[in-house]
Amino acid sequence: MDVENMLKSISDGTPTPGGGAVGWIVLGQGTALLRMVSNLTLKSKKWSGGHDPSRTILDATADFESRATVGYDADCHAYESVVNAYKLPEENQERQRGIESASLLAAEVPLELMEAALEISLLSKGLFGLHNKNAHSDLISSGLLLKTAAIIGSKNVKANIPYLSDEDSVGVKARHEEVRMGLMDVIPMITEGGGL
């Protein structure tokens, strides 16, 4: 999907793709910028201290385009599952279970987005300070995009928690909090505070 068609698809006024799906594209953009900085760092002996972390980043994120597009599609599918569950007749005994099951999927996909943002943010932290300084603003931009992806993921997880079974709610909340705390530690380091 090219950029123009993707933007049209998002703006069409249909429930999907929505914010969660866009979060995966933002993650892909943040990863692409981090890879750009890594490649620029590797091109010069001047930044040899950043060569090993740059190679680690490039190896660990080699499938980033696929990861972003698969996440985008998964988020659309998850939300469509929720919509379909709500379309079941209210007297149907399977309706509540269907809503809970679909809502769990709709919470897990953005939780995976948060986890991916944390994973890539930690890779960025390993390069920070050792990178090609000519691309410093690009590295900060990458961090801000990763932060945005994480926030989008978090908001979408929280939106689905009220519709989960009690058991699933406990598990999702615990996982969300663990990832959130990890992000709170690393994000300020890779965004220089993220202010204007």
Image (cartoon, grey):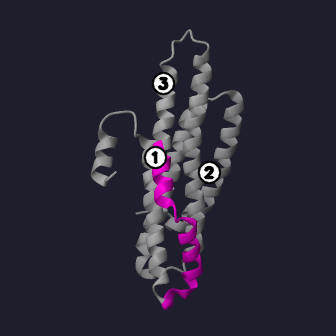
- How many residues crowd around disc 3 within 10 Å: few (fewer than 14), some, or many (20 or more)? few
How far across and how far down the image is residue 12, in percent? 29, 37
- Please state which amino acid type lies under the numbered disc 3: Asn
Q: Quadrant of residue 95?
A: top right
Q: Is 189 displayed left or right of 25 in the figure?
A: right
In reply to whether residue 97 is colored magenta, the answer given is no
Magenta stretch in the rendered image = 45-73
In the picture of the structure, the residue carrying the numbered disc 3 is 84
Which residue corresponds to the image point at 46% horizontal and 77% vertical from the top-left? 39
Q: Quadrant of residue 169?
A: top right
Q: What is the three-letter code of the residue carrying label 1?
A: Tyr
190 sits to left or right of 174: left
N-terminal of the pair, mark 3 or mark 1, is 1
| Residue 106: image location, x then y, percent | 54, 36
- Name above or below for residue 171 compared with residue 62: above
Question: In the structure shown, which secondary structural element does the residue marked by tag 3 occupy?
Answer: helix
**In x, y percent, where is residue 151?**
51, 49
Q: Would you name the residue on which mark 2 appears?
A: 180
Q: Is residue 80 visible?
A: yes
CB atoms at circles 1 and 2 under 8 Å apart? no
**Residue shown at 52%/65% (left/top)?**
62
Name the N-terminal-most of marks 1 and 2: 1
Q: What residue did someone put label 1 on? A: 72
Q: Is residue 65 magenta?
A: yes
Mark 3 to mark 1: distance in Å?
A: 19 Å
